[in-house]
Amino acid sequence: MTSPFEDRVFGVFLHPSSLAGPDDIGTFGKEAYDFVDWLARSGAGIWQILPLTPNGRDDSPYFSYSAFASNPWLIDVRVLRQACLLPGTGLRPDAVDFRVPYAELVATKRPLLLVAAETFLSSPLHEWRDDFSRFRAREAWLADAAHFCALKDVHGGAPWWEWPEPVRSREPHAVRASYAELEERIDVWEALFYFADRQWSELRAYAGSRGIKVLGELPFHVNHDSADVWSHQDQFRLDEAGRLTAQSGEPPGQVGETGQLTGRPVYRWDVMAKDDYRWWVERLRRGADLMDVVRINHFRAISASWEVPAGATDSGGGHWVPGPGQALFDVLTRNFPGLPFVVEDLGALGEDVYRLRDDNKLLGMRIVQLGFDGTDANPHLPHTYPTSCIASTGTSEGPTLIGWWDRLDPATREEVALYYQFSPTGDIGGIVWSFIEAVLGSRADVALIPMQDLLVLGDRARMNDPSATSGNWSWRMPVGALSDELADSLRTLGARYGRLRG
């Protein structure tokens, strides 16, 4: 395997929205820089984050209205004020850590962002204007994403397949007329996406100066109601009205008894192959521009994906459909020497998926919580980890270590405690840190620890529960959590197991 990381390294998983601060949501501002400094003190070399795209359905970054744009909610309004784009910020004097109230951001934060964007656009001599012009010229996705968001605004948030026919089907004259009519709104959205990109680029550069690489995630499927599908309708399985004819999902038995339906469109790989998967190349290039290493989510779908009829009520009527397989990676290898990608390869997978991963020398995942299913050959038991993998105590989709531990039956707890050599009735903090040490001490080249586990938090701190319909993606780290003591504890383990960076 070829690792995009140098030697043995460890990192911490914390999305910027989860940072405590004076805003209603964590941002790319001072608190993010403080977190980078804390990572450097701990000896970490990786900052793992969720997709940076705007939150969409159910507040999820996996259902974004654009697979290319950065999230304006993460903009630090203090920076906009310092740039003379806001008369004030309206922020609290002190940091807060309550859950992100996404529904309220439209009333509390959006007005500030709009004032800043409008001030910027009416200031032709502003020091950022030349950079903004370069951003507009460079980012080919920008015009469609901003136009899409402007259309969502004027159509009351209705999905694009319910818009008037000429614009829905992107008849050229209708798109031009709509762009001209909505130009001011489009400009505002372009400015907001620029502010987010500018702040993130500066933050990422700072992280690099402290020896920290950013590992970000790229969802495999995109949101049906997105600029990406609206502007590339021929590349997805849609009918003439833009509605789904099929959707992606998971088969029964892998995610519950009836499987899982995602409501996301299925790719037309035959069409994408005709232009050498250009949309995918551009999407991954955008990911590589924003992050040092990109994790491709749901990697198994590149080999084959579970496709379900659009109107199905469960996934039982689905079937496996071949993906592009090696043909896509041949194109990616030509475009991205060294392939700065890793993959999420969890679940019951076939040899075809492992072969695709290994033939392209991609690092896959190992998760401590998945290690105890009663089989001796379970690949998630730490003593079985190869060097060429990324080991972690958990994922954004699963429980925290405490949440997982609390769900275990007594017999499995005894088995786990025997394996890790601790008492099943011992202090919960000691138990959690035993798992953390096992990951850091494993043979895996890369070890990643969610911040919730470092802080020994229960499932109230869980980032996402797929069975819940509200409250996901809103957790924030407690104020004052980034203590020197915690950083030093991590550094001690990093030194013990040869993972220190700096």
Image (cartoon, helix red, strand yellow):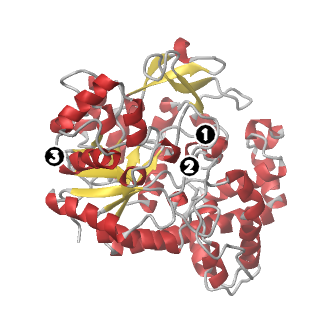
**Alpha carbon separation for disc pair 2 and 3:** 34 Å
Is residue 288 in view? Answer: yes
Image side of residue 164 versus residue 413, left or right: right
Label 3 residue SS: loop
Q: Is residue 260 above or below residue 79?
A: above
Query: Please, what is the three-letter code of the amino acid marked with disc 1?
Result: Asn
Q: Which mark is residue 73?
A: none
Q: Residues within 10 Å of mark 1 (few under 14, many from 20)?
A: many
The answer to whether the residue labelled 2 contacts the one labelled 1, judged by CB atoms less than 8 Å apart, is yes
Identify the residue shown where x is 61% and y is 70%: 22
Mark carried by residue 223: 1
Which quadrant: the C terminus?
bottom left
Q: Nearer the viewer, mark 2 or mark 3?
A: 3
Q: Residue at x 17, y 63 (%)?
A: 495
User: x, y (%) of residue 80?
Assistant: 64, 77
Secondary structure under the numbered disc 1 in the rendered image: loop
Residue 3 drawn at (x, y percent): 23, 52
Q: Is residue 119 above or below residue 163?
A: below
Which quarter of the figure has residue 379? top left
Badge number at residue 67: 2
| Residue at the spot of label 3 | 443
Q: Is residue 454 left or right of residue 355?
A: right
Q: Nearer the viewer, residue 256 or 325?
A: 256
Dot 3 or dot 1: first in sequence order is 1
